[in-house]
Amino acid sequence: MRDRNTEPTNHIDRAIQRTRSGDHDAFEIVVREYERGLRAWLAMQSPPGVDVDEVAQRSFVAAFTRLDDYRLGTSFSAWLFAIARYQLKTETTRLRRVADYHARYAPDLLQKELDRRANESPELGRLRLDHLQHCLHGLSEKLQLYIRWRYDEQISLDEMSQRSGRSVAAVKKQLWQIRQQLHACVENRLKAAGESP
């Protein structure tokens, strides 16, 4: 076991010691060294729906904040991957909870929304569509592209992931955010026109 005051012999330990001494930019050396391998490992270990890029980033942030816990001269990769394993476990637990919540409450919420729409007048439905068209035009070109891919071209999430260079989870999240933005826009326009039920 190496003493903390001993001069480190490899470039990772030297970068870590520089980081501990206040040169936070030196941690970039560590990230560059392990980023590709860590992402590949996470991609192989992750169940569907996990945003590997997000878990990798959290792992590096956790390693940076706990850098004083790492013992120079030991295996940094083993230490980092243990942190990543914990981050991945935390994320899969979170996703399981979200899925459980949706499994329990989504059918009820969906039924309420279907009932509300069934009682909506045809005129209000047409007005909603008009407002939706206006709101779609208000989206940035990038967000409109996601809408075209998904709803006009009806391409899969996997294909959208490949085209955009983002993970499937990131694409799902982006689509959810777009839908939320469009919903809020339509509701705001209905309220402004005094047409909201």
Image (spheres, rainbow, N blue to C red):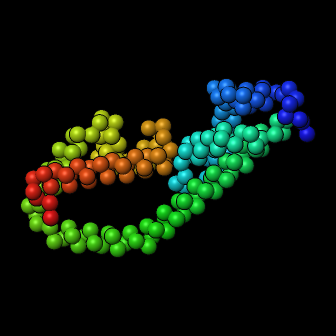
Instruction: Classify the position of the C terminus by image quarter.
Output: bottom left
Q: Residue at x 21, y 40 (%)?
A: 137
Q: Residue furthest right?
A: 1
- In this orientation, does residue 161 appear? yes
- Image coords of residue 141 (percent x, y): 30, 35
Q: Would you say 79 lies left or right of 146 here?
A: right
Instruction: Classify the position of the N terminus by image quarter.
Output: top right
Please name whichever residue, 65 or 27, is drawn nearer the observer in this view of the structure: 65
- In this orientation, does residue 158 appear? no
Q: Is residue 102 above or below residue 64?
A: below
Q: Would you say 38 lies left or right of 2 here?
A: left
> Quarter-wise, where is residue 4 in the image?
top right
Q: Residue at x 19, y 52 (%)?
A: 188
Q: Residue at x 18, y 46 (%)?
A: 133
Q: Is residue 29 above or below residue 81?
A: above
Q: Would you say 25 lies left or right of 50 here?
A: right
Please name whichever residue, 23 or 55, is drawn nearer the observer in this view of the structure: 23
Q: Is residue 28 above or below residue 183?
A: above
- Image coords of residue 146 (percent x, y): 35, 42
> Quarter-wise, where is residue 77 in the image?
top right
Instruction: Tell me how many marks there are.
Output: 0
> Quarter-wise, where is residue 31 in the image?
top right
Q: Residue at x 49, y 68 (%)?
A: 100
Please name whichever residue, 111 or 19, is drawn nearer the observer in this view of the structure: 19
- Image coords of residue 33 (percent x, y): 70, 31
- Image coords of residue 46 (percent x, y): 61, 53
